[in-house]
Image (cartoon, helix red, strand yellow):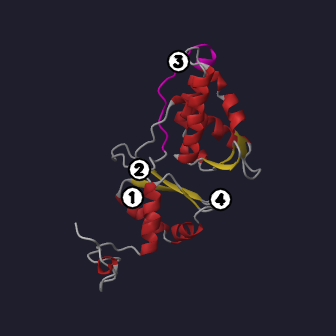
Amino acid sequence: MTESTTADVTPDEHGGLWRGDAGELPDRTRRVLLRLVRGPYLSGAREAQLWAVLLTDEAVLRSRLADLFLELVIDRDNEFAFVRNAPSEDAPKAVRSEALTFLDTAMLLVLRQTLLSEEGRGRVIVGQAEVFEQLAVFRTPDRDEKDFASRVNSSWNKMQNKLRVLHAVGDDRAEISPVLRLLVDADQIRAITSEYHRIARGGGGESAAPSTDAEDDTE
């Protein structure tokens, strides 16, 4: 493989972004398209320039995403957007669901319920300890406290670093992203709630967790 030269990456006479570029979208629109496909979501508060382009070029972005069997979801009030699989049983699944443990999914439910209960009050901040306390019911007899704490801590880290539905604001405290209202759907909530009651009645054991619609972040 030869080393790239400056000529290899400069726009050609036909207006492409590099020699041989067959794309039709301008650079800024391509960057938003790529950001959406990479996931897990685009935040207007954190990526203001991309958000502005998204709103300006929404129609063409929806069209290009539809070509990939993807649907664009935009929450203008809370300023976030993400893509999900097209709502058709015949369409191939373009978005890879994030593999979650049951504790991951249970934590998502706890965070979502907290977010909804505080809706309209501005930023929703939670402490790690209070979330962990709500998940304590899921510690089954075969899990000692240290092992369970390690698993819950792993879920907390995944919420921050992988799914990005938590944003650290201090020691052991984080802001819940409003995108979480849409990432967990009604069927998943029913499944988790049912499992919560089963374990609370003494059913024990960890069940397989339903996947979220959050895209697997490959960055």
| Up/down of 64 relative to 191, above or below | below
Q: Amino acid at mark 2?
A: Ala
Name the kind of residue labelled 3 in the image: Gly
| Highlighted magenta segment, given as a residue range | 198-213
- Whichever of labels 1 and 2 marks the residue nearer the N terminus, that label is 1
Residue 74 visible (yes or no): no
For residue 198, above or below residue 214:
above
Q: Which disc, if any, is residue 66?
A: 1
Give the labeled residue for mark 2: 86
SS at mark 4 in the image: loop
Q: Are marks 1 and 2 in contact (CB under 8 Å)?
A: yes
Give amino acid for label 4: Asp
Can you say which quadrant of the picture contains the N terminus?
Answer: bottom left
Query: On the rendered structure, is 135 left or right of 142?
Result: right
User: Percent from the top left, x then y, of residue 91?
Assistant: 34, 47
Callout 1, which amino acid? Ala
Foreground disc of the pair 3, 2:
3
> Residue at coordinates 75% horizontally, 53% vertically from top-left?
122
Label placed on residue 205: 3
- Give left or right: position of 85 versus 149: left
Q: Toward the viewer: 184 or 208?
A: 208
The crowd level at tag 1 (other Cα within 10 Å; few <14, some 14-19, many 20+) is some
Q: Earlier in the sequence, mark 3 or mark 2?
A: 2
> Which badge, 3 or 1, comes first in the chain's sequence?
1
Q: Secondary structure at mark 3?
A: loop
